[in-house]
């Protein structure tokens, strides 16, 4: 199946890290690579966990927007938290609730020892469905 890779100008250039941000398929599925609290150069913009979650979700929205979609089109999330604990879960739950209210998409949360860059504490990837 042919697909289109989209690297939105509002996000850092991922090619130097060996990936593309969005794969848009003819079947209507849209896959968004892991988004994190990256600035325009791909560096982590903040050390604060809550801010990292907020920026990663904002980057997810930018990636979805490049495919003409938004949060309501997300059918699955996968989240990754470094040194996961209940305080971080509460932060994530609040941020997810701010976006999806009482109807969040299915989500798998994985606690990890580290992510791609040393300063990363949170990452989220998504699958969306074009209506």
Image (tube, rainbow, N blue to C red):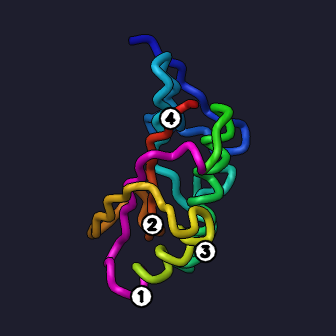
Q: Which of marks 2 and 3 precedes in the sequence?
A: 3
Instruction: Tell me if 119 is positioned left or right of 111 in this view.
Output: right
Horizontal and vertical percent for residue 61? 64, 50
Horizontal and vertical percent for residue 98? 62, 71
125 vs 44: above or below: above
Q: Secondary structure at mark 3?
A: helix
Query: Image point 51% across, 46% down: which residue?
Result: 74
Residue at which label 3 appears:
51
Query: Image point 49% across, 28% down: which residue?
Result: 23
Quadrant of the drawing holding the N terminus: top left
Q: Is there CB contact under 8 Å for labels 4 and 2?
A: no
Horizontal and vertical percent for residue 108? 32, 59
Q: Which mark is residue 87?
A: 1
Label 2, residues with CA under 10 Å away: few <14, some 14-19, many ≥20: many
Q: Which of marks 1 and 2 precedes in the sequence?
A: 1
Label 4, residues with CA under 10 Å away: few <14, some 14-19, many ≥20: some
Q: Label 3 to label 4, Cα distance in Å?
A: 27 Å
Residue at which label 4 appears:
129
Please provide the residue range marked out in magenta.
Answer: 72-88
**Residue 28 can be seen, yes or no:** yes
Tell me the mark number nearer the camera, choosing from 2 and 1: 1
Q: Which of marks 2 and 4 precedes in the sequence?
A: 2
Q: Secondary structure at mark 1?
A: helix
Question: Is residue 17 shown in magenta?
Answer: no
Q: Which of marks 3 and 1 precedes in the sequence?
A: 3
């Amino acid at each position: 199946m042919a697909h289109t890779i989209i690297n939105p100008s509002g996000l850092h250039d991922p090619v130097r890290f060996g990936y593309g941000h969005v794969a848009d398929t003819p079947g209507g599925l849209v896959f968004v690579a892991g988004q994190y609290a990256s600035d325009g150069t791909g560096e982590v913009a903040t050390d604060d966990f809550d801010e990292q979650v907020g920026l990663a979700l904002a980057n997810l929205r930018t990636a979805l927007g490049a495919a003409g979609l938004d949060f309501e089109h997300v059918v699955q999330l996968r989240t990754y938290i470094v040194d996961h604990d209940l305080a971080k879960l509460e932060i994530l739950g609040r941020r997810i609730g701010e976006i999806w209210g009482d109807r969040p998409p299915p989500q798998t949360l994985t606690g990890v020892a580290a992510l791609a860059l040393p300063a990363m504490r949170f990452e989220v990837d998504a699958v969306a469905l074009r209506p």
